[in-house]
Amino acid sequence: MAPAGRPAAAGRIEHMDMPYMDKRSPLVSIVVPCFNEEETIAETHRRLDALATERPGERFEFLFVNDGSRDRTLELLRGIAASDRRVRVVSFARNFGHQLAVTAGIDHARGDAVVLIDADLQDPPEVVKEMIDRWKDGYEVVYGVRTDRPGESRFKLLTAHFFYRLLNWLSDTPIPLDTGDFRLMDRTVADVLRAMPERDRFVRGLVSWVGFRQLALPYRRAERYAGSTKYPLRKMLRFASDGMVSFSVKPLKLAMMTGLASAVVASLGILWVLGARLLTDAWVVPGWSATIIAILFLGGMQLLCTGILGEYIGRIYMQAKGRPLYVVGEVIGPGSNAAADDIAERK
Ligand code: UDP
Ligand code: MG
């Protein structure tokens, strides 16, 4: 079955045509987004290899998505792919961001289950074993919930704490608290995600939206193995606004409510001014500060509300252009010809 709403690209591997999941030896795709991860990538591959060795009951595919790294990541990935047949590398033409790297991974994965994991080993590969077990119990999604996040700055912990709570309050779909993209999803869920054409992707929210049986799996997050975070404040803010704007129109409603509230206050003010002018002769020119406060407050509110409108309109504009979500420059590894036909097909 081709994903609804989008014609199947030539050469695209149609998972649904395959005999559905061989329960004895299912294929598990592990998707690893990488951006400037030269210091960690070899160790990540080693840990994934160790995981595969411990699980003879499953077959594995390691899908590294190189998100336009500017260091030696791609070169190292080439070496890894040459030495390990289970490895495929999808390399972007430039940096498109973590969420799109994950999206490309889901698009290219062939497994009966798809696991998303960070390259920096903050999400321990060993937890994947348990995810697979729970999946075999019948859950379509098993998502990791962080009970502990050592090695993160106070600022990051605090902002993340409030962000997930605010997001949940805003969102019409409940999105689990303290959950990253570290998760396992069944082929059915991956196929639904592949059929979603939306641009500003907040993958963890999209997976919650899909539904099915979802299970929370608590785990301790580790420290980054090496290197530094690839999420500077700018990317974090963009990510947070994607989450909020893509999952809710409440900010628009809030803008309307504050508009209404200030209109009510303004009409009371007008009545009061008129009353004072007409009924009393005590009217001199005090009230300069009240005027300035009103002007500043209303001006601020208007700008804020226009800004909120702009956020949505900008996204509608970008979506309307219908550009591909990402551009693949190169696919390395087994079956890469079929996958190469997929270049820039993803709309
Ligand atoms: N990443 C990516 N593209 C980017 C930024 C990050 O593919 O533009 C990858 C990165 O290589 C890592 C994952 O996304 O595998 C999470 O990034 P990071 O560990 O830097 O974020 P943090 O854990 O600090 O939030
Ligand atoms: Mg990290």
Image (cartoon, rainbow, N blue to C red):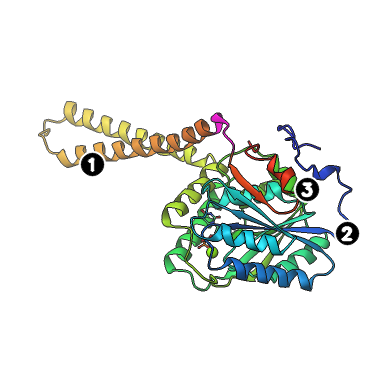
**Which residues lie in the magenta part?**
319-324
- Disc sitting over residue 181 in the figure: none
**Ligand 1 within 8 Å of the CB at mark 3:** no
Q: Is residue 95 visible?
A: yes
The mark lying in front, picked from 2 and 1, is: 2
Which residue corresponds to mark 1? 293
Whether tag 3 and tag 2 are in contact, CB under 8 A, the answer is no
**Quarter location, residue 30:** bottom right
The mark lying in front, picked from 3 and 1, is: 3
- Ranked by sequence position, the earlier of labels 3 and 1 is 3
Residue depicted at 69% across the width and 68% down the height: 48
Whether tag 2 and tag 1 are in contact, CB under 8 A, the answer is no
Q: Within 10 Å of the Cα at label 2, are there few (<14), some (14-19), or many (20+) other Cα atoms?
A: few
Residue depicted at 54% across the width and 48% down the height: 243
> What element does badge 3 sit on?
helix
Quote the CA–CA distance across marks 2 and 1. Answer: 68 Å
**Ligand 1 within 8 Å of the CB at mark 1:** no
Q: Within 10 Å of the Cα at label 3, are there few (<14), some (14-19), or many (20+) other Cα atoms?
A: some
Which residue corresponds to mark 3? 188
Which residue corresponds to mark 2? 23
- Label 1 is placed on what type of residue? Ile
Quote the CA–CA distance across marks 3 and 1. Answer: 56 Å
> Residue 97, position in %: x, y?
53, 50
Membership of 322 in magenta stretch: yes
